[in-house]
Amino acid sequence: MKTSELNSEFADFKKEVFAGDYFIHNISAGSTMRILDLEGNQAADTLFYNARDPSERYSATDTIREQGNVYLTDGSVLRSNLNNPMLEIVADTCGRHDTLGGACATESNTVRYDLEKRCMHACRDSWMLAIAENPEFNLGKGDITHNINFFMNVPITEEGGLTFEDGISAPGKYVELKALMDTTVLISNCPQLNNPCNGYNPTPIEVLVWNA
Ligand SMILES: [Zn+2]
């Protein structure tokens, strides 16, 4: 865990993202972005792309292999599918973030919870809406791949199993990332009502950016 030296008063950009909304934004190399869990136990389902060529994007497998650990925290370097460093986590007051659990989708909601949950809003819908409403980012359906679930707690059991557990975040916890390339950030602030990871209560997050 590592706290930030940056002062939120001097951020160049700030936006509150309500639960169930998406956030799409370009940050330039050298800039620092903070994702702030305003009320605690929220999940920010996040994808990253090379802003100059979105066919290069965040890769969970490359990131996990290179750092030799499945959890993300300060010091983690997020790698692309070309194994290039994209961003580095430079501060983290939550302590652990997931990149194994994937995002909620209406289809997986029916498998995990109940057939009648199919109509409920899911992160994949928010991402699809984001790319449809913002064609200038040149993203398509096929670009929706590996993601990070900031603030989400998916511990591995001794047998190697995945478990979705109560969140370990709390109001005011944050994670901060420094961009190592010009990066498109796509976040779904998870609307999930069936998962203990966000306490069954989706809440807003805030995104802050300090430009390079
Ligand atoms: Zn979700």
Image (cartoon, rainbow, N blue to C red):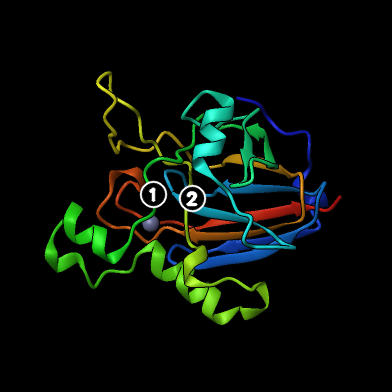
Q: What residue is rendered at 83% in x and 50% in y?
A: 10
- Looking at this view, name the residue that lies furthest to the right: 212
Q: Where is residue 102 in the image (x, y as percent from the top left)?
A: 39, 49
Dot 2 corresponds to which residue? 147
Q: Where is residue 166 in the image (x, y as percent from the top left)?
A: 32, 37
Give the Cα separation between the discs numbered 1 and 2. Answer: 6 Å
Q: Residues within 10 Å of mark 1 (few under 14, many from 20)?
A: some
Disc 1 vs disc 2: Cβ atoms closer than 8 Å?
yes
Q: Position of residue 182 (x, y in %)?
A: 77, 55
Q: Is mark 1 on a helix, strand or loop?
A: loop
Which of these two is toward me, 12 or 89? 89
Q: How crowded is mark 2: few (under 14 residues within 10 Å), some or many (20 or more)?
A: many
Quadrant including the N terminus: top right
Residue 44 versus residue 132 in the image, above or below: above
Q: Which quadrant contains ligand 1?
A: bottom left
Q: What element carries label 2?
A: loop
Which of these two is toward me, 144 or 21? 144
Q: Where is residue 81 in the image (x, y as percent from the top left)?
A: 59, 47
Which of these two is toward me, 176 or 47? 47
Residue 123 versus residue 139 in the image, above or below: above
On whether ligand 1 comes within 8 Å of the CB at mark 2, the answer is no
Tag count: 2
Circle 2: residue type:
Asn
Q: What residue is rendered at 40% in x and 65% in y?
A: 124
Q: What residue is rendered at 28% in x and 49% in y?
A: 195
Position of 189 with respect to 30 (left or right) is left
Q: Earlier in the sequence, mark 1 or mark 2?
A: 1
Q: What residue is rendered at 69% in x and 42% in y?
A: 84
Residue 55 versus residue 2 in the image, above or below: below
Dot 1 corresponds to which residue? 102
Which of these two is toward me, 18 or 77? 77
